[in-house]
Amino acid sequence: MVTLDLLVIIFSLIFGSFFNVVAIRLLKKESISYPPSHCTTCSHRLGALDLVPVFSYIFLRGRCRYCKDKISPSYPLGEGFTAVTIFIVYKEIGITPELIPALILSILLILAVLTDIREKLILDIITIPCLIILLIVRIFIGEEPFLTYLIGGLTGFVVLLLIAVISKGGMGGGDIKLYAVIGVALGPLLTIMSLVIASFFGAVVGIVLLTLKIVKRREPIAFGPFIFVGTLLAYLYGNHIWNWYSSLIF
Ligand SMILES: [Zn+2]
């Protein structure tokens, strides 16, 4: 099992490196496959050694091997973030059919965080294909009947749409569509829990950032990272959270 764990970590680091490229290039509306990976300062094409996730960054002390310009720490951070996420999901779900929808959801959430943090955008070109694939997967895989997941998708979409209308744009279109996918993955009840947790963390962090004057009032903050936290907590630990919560109030 240790070998398998190690393989999962290595592959998810490589995937993380790919997701960085996907996020950056799709935001710039560039092709994902062309041109090959290059330094953004000197345009030198990167060799295999430069592309080893996390380690090449540490080994090269965060600088390009050719022009010595600084490489953004967002690269190794994105790689580490992907690896940690996928490893936790794989460990919690185990090698079961549910791992397939779990990984689709995780990949979407990771990409949503990577684009939302950079440009405050969650891209349809990523969300919509994930929605279609996950709907098909949910016909075959899931503890609940397909209809429950379908209702979940509608719940996520409608609730977020209502929040967007009531808050007059406090929630972006990207968030609304993302929650449709989350609904299909989680079903209606855990989707609501995910939103409650996301809003709670969003409010706490928002207040801290305002108090420390890191952001200004009315300045939008990316909600993607909070959706990420809320959704994975609800999806992986929803039952535990519910039991703990009910023991507090009953
Ligand atoms: Zn360079």
Image (tube, rainbow, N blue to C red):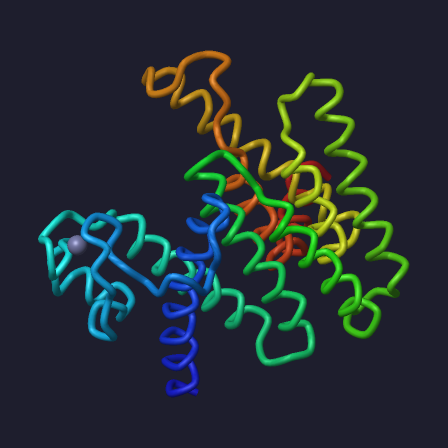
Write down the quadrant of residue 215 in the picture. top left
Q: Please state, as top left, top right, bottom left or bottom right, where the N terminus lies in the image.
A: bottom left
Residue in the foreground of this view, choosing between 151 and 211: 151
Whole-percent x, y for residue 105 in the image = 62, 59
- Residue visible at 21% across and 50% down? 71
Quadrant in the rendering for residue 160: top right
Q: How many marks?
A: 0
Name the residue located 19 percent from the left edge and 66 percent from the top edge.
Answer: 56
Instruction: Measuring from the top left, give residue 140's x and y in whole percent.
Output: 81, 74
Quadrant containing ligand 1: bottom left
Looking at the image, which residue is at 11% across and 60% down? Answer: 66
Residue 123: image x %, image y %? 59, 44
207 is higher (above) or lower (below) than 198: above
Relative to the observer, which residue lies in front, 12 or 246? 12
User: Where the C terminus falls, by quadrant?
Assistant: top right
In the image, what residue occupies the spot 78% across and 27% down?
162
103 up-or-down from 72: above or below: below
Image vertical order of residue 164 relative to residue 118, above or below: above
Q: Is residue 76 above or below residue 56?
A: above
Residue 230: image location, x then y, percent: 58, 44
Q: Is residue 196 left or right of residue 20?
A: right
